[in-house]
Image (cartoon, coloured by chain):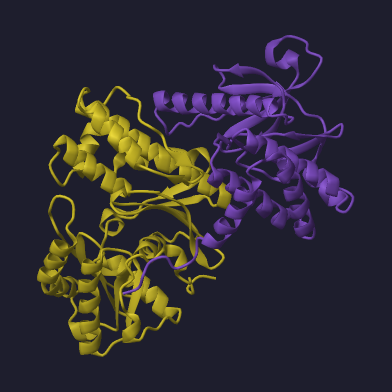
């Protein structure tokens, strides 16, 4: 067993079936255990931690129904407030794009199509970065729905895309434009309302947080 | 350099005086009424302005001619109230022929903490009636990392108190009820990333108050509200990788909020810093400190630039006095 990641929200462990529950399994597990907060009173903390755990599990499951690869959910462990899921063995899309920037354009089209499938089913990932996409046997697997939500609305879906664009700009800055074009190309093939969503992204970008909002007197 | 600062963004009219090393005096007079009527509050400020200024000078053992710089809260705040402070500041500046600087009220809350406690680079949780924000310095500005999408936590508390018949001012009574509560009732917990909102929980709490003991309702409401801002603050600390947390604003007086911040910071190897209440609440000393710091860094303002800015956001200010 080892700790893959420790965040403010959750701890991620890689375990074998033996380590998790004393049963040998033909595959490894990832246990995402939400961190309890001592500053919150226990009844409130339990409620929040449990509802977020269940919410994330539902998103993972619904995403699969939308036709997108996600880790298979095995168990919601309410005593550890953890979700227990399949361990995805593969390469992060981030590394693939950095290693082979010019030969990965088709991959970006496929990612766009997958995000379109999620949105068409009213699923917003909430943290779309190339670190949260894993390439396994040619399939793109979406992980970490911890900030996701169910919403058919234009605004959160457009924000979802905007975040992905920002991720491209910060991590794949040399290829941002061609990746973004390819991404949208794929997105349009699976998302019926794509025009409206893409239009909204321009709005979001213009809003900017640092413009003078109030009138002066 | 001796700086006199004037605060008048909302309920409180305050005058504070500082020199390069310390706060020399800090006098406030607060408008008392249920809620706040901007014009009545402004009338109050105009009534007490002369007296508060005199007392601030007296406490510092100075006379008006000793002042080298006048600063005032230019915003954000209520227009009529801001205008009283700005007018008083202009008059002082003209009469004594000293420079004038308008400063941002929210940023003054941060700078006075840094000045008094010597903290270099904190994440600031600023909790008051009108404002609830999480601020941190990045790239030449105080960025707003999280903030309320509707009302401030203090405003929520006051509205709740009024709805359930707690007398104004309600802070102490609310703190008592919070510590007397034992049963947690379900209250909506609304947080989106680092932003949050309070009106949903306010309505729910008022509904609960019809059928449950007031101490349990108040306890549940405030536990929920504080948990949300502390969670958002923790995210901001984690995101910016800063380890110091500065508390500011009138609601920083809440013992429970202080305790929660202390636990959160401790659990992530950080530290909480809480200035004395006299400079946490709205006050003139923080405006004096901010004016002095900005002037020393080269900020100059002509009289026509001293018009008030009711909706002036913290992240619009060029932080010329750092790095």
Q: Is residue A182 above or below residue A82?
A: below
Q: Is residue B231 visible in the rendered structure shown here?
A: no
In front of the other: A199 or B277: A199
Give residue B243's position: percent from left, percent from top.
52, 50
Give residue B44's position: percent from left, percent from top.
12, 65
Q: Residue at the location (42% across, 38% down)?
A: B190
Q: Is residue A161 above or below residue B58?
A: above
In front of the other: A99 or A117: A117
Among the chains pictured, the one given yellow colouring is B
Give residue B18's position: percent from left, percent from top.
29, 72
Give the residue at the far bottom of this rendering. B97
Q: Residue at the location (54% across, 16% down)?
A: A79
Q: How many callouts does the rendering have?
A: 0
Q: Is residue A8 above or below residue A27?
A: below
In front of the other: B13 or B151: B151
Q: Residue at the location (29% across, 43% down)?
A: B254
Q: Give the left or right position of residue A209, taking residue A174 as reference.
A: left
Q: Quadrant of the N terminus of chain B?
A: bottom left
Q: Hey, which quadrant is residue A91 in on the image? A: top right
Q: Is residue A135 above or below residue B21?
A: above
Q: Quadrant of the C terminus of chain B?
A: bottom right
Q: Residue at the location (36% across, 61% down)?
A: B109
Q: Is residue A82 visible in the rendered structure shown here?
A: yes
Among the chains pictured, the one given purple colouring is A
Give residue B79's position: percent from left, percent from top.
25, 67
């Amino acid at each position: 067993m080892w700790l893959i990641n420790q965040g403010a929200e959750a701890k991620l462990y890689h375990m074998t079936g033996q380590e998790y529950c004393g049963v040998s399994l033909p595959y490894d597990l990832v246990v995402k255990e939400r961190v309890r907060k001592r500053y919150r009173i226990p009844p409130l903390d339990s409620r929040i931690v449990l509802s977020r755990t269940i919410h994330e599990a539902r998103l993972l499951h619904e995403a699969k129904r939308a036709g997108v690869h996600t880790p298979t959910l095995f168990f919601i462990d309410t005593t550890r407030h953890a979700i227990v899921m399949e361990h995805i063995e593969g390469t992060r899309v981030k590394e693939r794009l950095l290693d082979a920037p010019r030969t990965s354009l088709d991959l970006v089209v496929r990612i766009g199509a997958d995000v379109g499938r999620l949105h068409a089913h009213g699923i917003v990932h909430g943290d779309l970065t190339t670190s949260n996409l894993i390439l396994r046997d040619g399939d793109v697997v979406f992980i970490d729905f911890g900030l996701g939500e169910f919403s058919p609305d234009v605004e959160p879906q457009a924000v979802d895309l905007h975040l992905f664009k920002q991720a491209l700009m910060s991590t794949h800055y040399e290829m941002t434009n061609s990746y973004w074009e390819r991404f949208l190309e794929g997105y349009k093939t699976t998302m019926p309302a794509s025009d409206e969503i893409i239009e909204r992204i321009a709005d979001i970008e213009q809003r900017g947080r640092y413009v003078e909002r109030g009138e002066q007197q | 350099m001796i700086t006199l600062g004037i605060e008048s963004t909302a309920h409180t009219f305050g005058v504070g005086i500082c020199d390069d090393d310390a706060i020399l005096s800090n006098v406030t007079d607060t408008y008392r009424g249920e809620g706040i009527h901007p014009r009545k509050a402004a009338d109050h400020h105009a009534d007490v302005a002369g007296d508060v200024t005199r007392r601030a000078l007296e406490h510092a053992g100075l006379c008006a001619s000793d002042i080298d710089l006048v600063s005032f809260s230019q915003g954000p705040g209520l227009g009529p109230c801001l205008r009283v402070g700005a007018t008083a500041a202009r008059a002082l500046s003209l009469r004594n022929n000293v420079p004038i600087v308008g400063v941002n009220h929210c940023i003054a809350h941060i700078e006075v903490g840094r000045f008094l406690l010597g903290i270099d680079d904190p994440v600031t949780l600023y909790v008051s009636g009108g404002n609830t924000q999480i601020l941190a310095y990045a790239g030449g500005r105080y960025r707003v990392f999280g903030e309320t999408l509707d009302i401030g936590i203090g405003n929520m508390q006051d509205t709740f108190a009024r709805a359930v018949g707690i007398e104004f001012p309600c802070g102490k009574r609310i703190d008592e009820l919070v510590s007397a509560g034992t049963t947690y009732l379900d209250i909506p917990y609304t947080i989106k990333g680092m932003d949050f909102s309070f009106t949903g929980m306010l309505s729910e709490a008022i509904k609960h108050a019809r059928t449950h003991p007031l101490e349990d309702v108040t306890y549940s409401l405030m536990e929920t509200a504080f948990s949300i801002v502390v969670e958002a603050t923790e995210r901001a600390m984690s995101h910016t990788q800063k380890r110091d947390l500065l508390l500011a604003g009138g609601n920083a007086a809440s013992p429970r909020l202080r305790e929660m911040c202390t636990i959160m910071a401790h659990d992530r190897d950080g530290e909480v810093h809480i200035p004395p209440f006299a400079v946490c609440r709205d006050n003139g000393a923080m405006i004096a400190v901010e004016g002095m710091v900005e002037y020393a860094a080269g900020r100059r303002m002509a009289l026509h630039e001293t018009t008030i800015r009711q909706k002036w956001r913290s992240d619009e200010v060029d932080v010329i006095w750092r790095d």
